[in-house]
Image (cartoon, coloured by chain):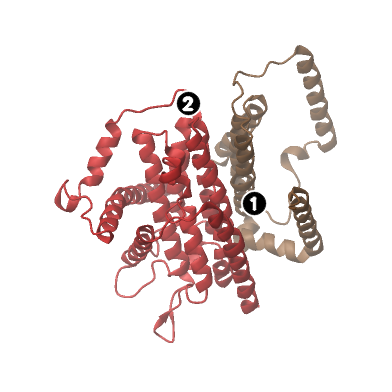
Amino acid sequence: MEWIFFLAFGLVAAVAAVAMVLQRSPIYSALYLILALFAQAGLYILLGAELIAAVHIIVYAGAIMVLFLFVIMLLDLGRTDRSPARVKPVGVIVGTVLAGLLLAELAVGVGPQIVLGPRGAYDPEVLRTVGNTRAVGRILFREYLIPFELTSLILLTAMVGAMVLAKRKVE
Amino acid sequence: MMMEFLLATVLKIALVMGLVLLAVAYLTWLERKVIGDMQVRFGPSRVGPFGLLQPIADAIKLMFKEDIIPAHADRVIFLLAPALTLVPALIIFAVIPFGPSFVITDVNIGLLYVFAVASLGVYGIVLAGWASNSKYALLGGLRSSAQMVSYELSLALSVIGVVMWTGSLSLVEIVEGQAGSWYGIVPRWNIFPQFFGFLIFLVSSNAELNRAPFDLAEAETELVAGYHTEYSSMKFALFFMAEYANMIAAGALAATLFLGGWQGPFLPPVIWFLLKVFAFIFLFVWLRATLPRFRYDQLMRFGWKVLLPAALANVMVTAALLA
């Protein structure tokens, strides 16, 4: 049962990701990216990480991608022609070689772990008893409290910085 | 075992969806009747007794109307947008508990699921506005997406207090946490400890629904009809249905989070739940009949400078009380 869902979500994610790159219209690219994000959230759910899946959708699909679409529409970038991108043969060759190299590096560097991965303390059985949100909260606020607070500080600084940069001077 | 589970789930989904869609149809009748009464008119009265067959007549009319797609519209997205608006509105009901054991699925992150799904409603609107290739539709779509993104923040923050109070994100557990009463008379509903959260939730959910006084997206006096200007026949009806389905969902969520869901004495739980939802729906209709529309800058200022700080303060005060 799980297998079918895994294959379906994985396939949709991969196809949508490729389609996103191949689209010429930014709007369609954005829509394919959203589809890929959804399929990825499905994979998280299969792994027993419902909290991550929900947060993933809320933050990326619900907020960031809406802003992307917003900007695309405000700048009116959407109406380029929708014929598939013309690719030069040189580009295809260079791209294939680079992708192959990357894959080989991954295979050598990570080995069979790339499929299986090491098993952590919080496998689906443990999560079922502790509860997803509780587990994440506990780890964040006990083991990783200082990195967590530092991250939020960096985010706050970035936000203030963005506001200062974006704010035009009013005479 | 597997078959039984599947069958029971499918039956539950069919029942809930049937109920919601029927309620959507008759909400149009209710809204026209109530607003008619408030404006000293009759409202629909010709089709059937008390105009009760009006929604059916409307549905038949909408199905047989000519379906127009504007000449330079983006056909794929133009067709996709109404569905993208209606589907999130309907799948919210998957986690809403209608009674003690009547919920389609009890997800342990139920509330986050609701917000994840609700945040997708924007796409239908913004894409409809863009794909129509019309100035009015685009302006309406951009306006409403800006509005929905702004008010989503205070909406999500307003319920954090409830989550902290209950200690759970599961809607079933939130309802169960509101069982019993204080001093034997006051029910243990979250509305009492979380009254400010409740007010913020009510205002921002009304804004999320794009309903008066927050219906800037379809301000007919300036934007023709907003994002669905170019839509006709059943595709237009889908937007309409989405608005009403969202209204029911907002009412159901408010009842679940703040009014104890299906909890209540004497009457069966499902009846209690439906009564509470109905009260909220009536309130939304009432607000529409009473209040004039905001100006756009007022709307944005209110959302960011009043509601959001108030919601943040509510979270802080709740945390201080619980600590």
Q: Which residue is mark 1?
A: A52
The residue marked by circle 2 belongs to what chain? Answer: B
Q: Secondary structure at mark 2?
A: helix
Q: Residue A128: percent from the left, percent from the top?
A: 60, 58
* Residue at the far bottom in the pictured view: B183
Identify the residue shown where x is 60% and y is 32%. Answer: A27
Label at residue B318: none
Quick check: A16 left or right of B176?
right
In terms of depth relative to the viewer, which is nearer, A39 or B58?
A: B58
The chain drawn in red is: B
Q: Residue B152: percent from the left, percent from the top?
A: 56, 55
> CA separation, marks 1 and 2?
35 Å
Residue type, numbered disc 1: Ile
Q: Residue B311: percent from the left, percent from the top?
A: 59, 66
> Could you say which quadrant of the image residue B278 lies in?
bottom left
Give the mark toward the camera: 1 or 2. 2
> Could you say which quadrant of the image residue A104 lies in?
top right
The chain drawn in brown is: A
Circle 2 residues within 10 Å: few <14, some 14–19, many ≥20: few
Q: Residue A142: percent from the left, percent from the top?
A: 76, 66
* Above or below for B29 versus A100: below
Q: Which residue is mark 2?
A: B75
